[in-house]
Image: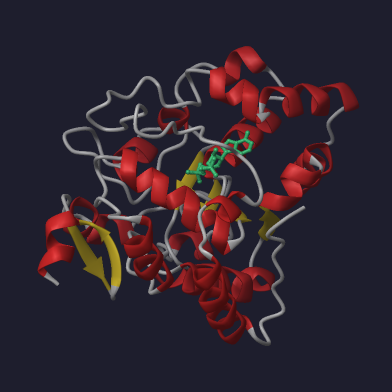
Amino acid sequence: FSEELEIVDNKMGEVQGVPLPEATCEIWEQIYNFQAREDDILISTYPKAGTTWMQEIVDLIMLDGDVKKSMRSPCFVKVPFIELYPKPMPSGVQAANAMESPRLLKTHLPTQLLPPSFWEKNVKVIYVARNMKDCMVSYFHFQRMNQALPHPGTWNEYFSKFTAGNVPWGGWFDHVIGWWKIKDKHQILFVFYEDIIEDPKREIRKISQFLGKELREEVLDTIQHHTSFSTMKENPMTNYSVLPSSVFDQSISPFMRKGKVGDWKNHFLVAQNIVFDEEYQKKMEGIGLNFRTEL
Ligand code: A3P
């Protein structure tokens, strides 16, 4: 236990048993009482499922593929992250309140913690889901480089923490299953990271139709190109290079790291994979939610 404490270098709190940054917990009332607007679009994800990618895709759809306009500001400025409070900067709630409609918003909250106003206003939600093994690997590297989150420890330590849901924003199972179960009761488009990798244009078209936009083929092509991994890795508005290394230390691991399906194979030990698959099967049995861990 003392070893565990030593590797935690950033303070986390808890809301209803879900680990969240301490600053988020401090202003939880404000966050939970956030007032959504009918024409908001919410991107909801478990961390590392492809949030930033979806932000760019949706922003470009709303802009009819206008790349220049999409580069007006960094992704984390144009899309407020509602439950984040990156002191001394304004909170996500403040940033969103100051923004003109239509707003594009981001959250990692599990369904039970989402501000009820989103449901009341029947806001359109795009949920991006990514297979748990690749999420774990991506989050491990992200917690290494993001100085605002607890240090992940070694890969072996992280494997236990992540599978137990003992990471910021809580467990993958609760999050993904919660959103999956609620998806038909609201305007929620459930999108898989692996599907976007497989056929980005097909998924971009699906998302634009969900948002009530019919885009020409060449606009879809432009969006696909501008949101490809290699383009976003070079784009200072999407690769987080504008943040100082005291926040994101990209010399440890770049934000735009690999963008692949199946990188878990380079991390999971054979024994870990066996333990994982067994536990995973138990938790996901009967849910009807199937992920691909390779293409
Ligand atoms: P990896 O760490 O596996 O590379 P989030 O935005 O939710 O934090 O997710 C980040 C993950 O999405 C990272 O995964 C990142 O590389 C990947 N990603 C971001 N943009 C992408 C793109 N255009 N294509 C594929 N993957 C992308």
Residue 31 place in picture, x, y as percent? 30, 55
Residue 192 place in picture, x, y as percent? 69, 55
The one nearer the camera, 178 or 198, is 198
132 over 275 or under it: above or below: above
Q: Is residue 71 left or right of residue 36?
A: right
Q: Quadrant of ligand 1?
A: top right
228 over 73 or under it: above or below: below
Q: Is residue 63 left or right of residue 200?
A: left
The one nearer the camera, 136 or 93, is 136
Residue 217 place in picture, x, y as percent? 89, 27
- Can see residue 45? no
Residue 71 place in picture, x, y as percent? 54, 17
Q: How many marks?
A: 0
- Can see residue 44? yes
Q: Quadrant of the N terminus?
A: bottom left
The one nearer the camera, 86 or 40, is 86
Q: Residue at x 32, y 24 (%)?
A: 243
Q: Residue at x 53, y 59 (%)?
A: 121
Q: Residue at x 18, y 55 (%)?
A: 7
- State how the image is colored: secondary structure
Q: Dividing the picture into quarters, in which one does residue 181 lie?
A: bottom right
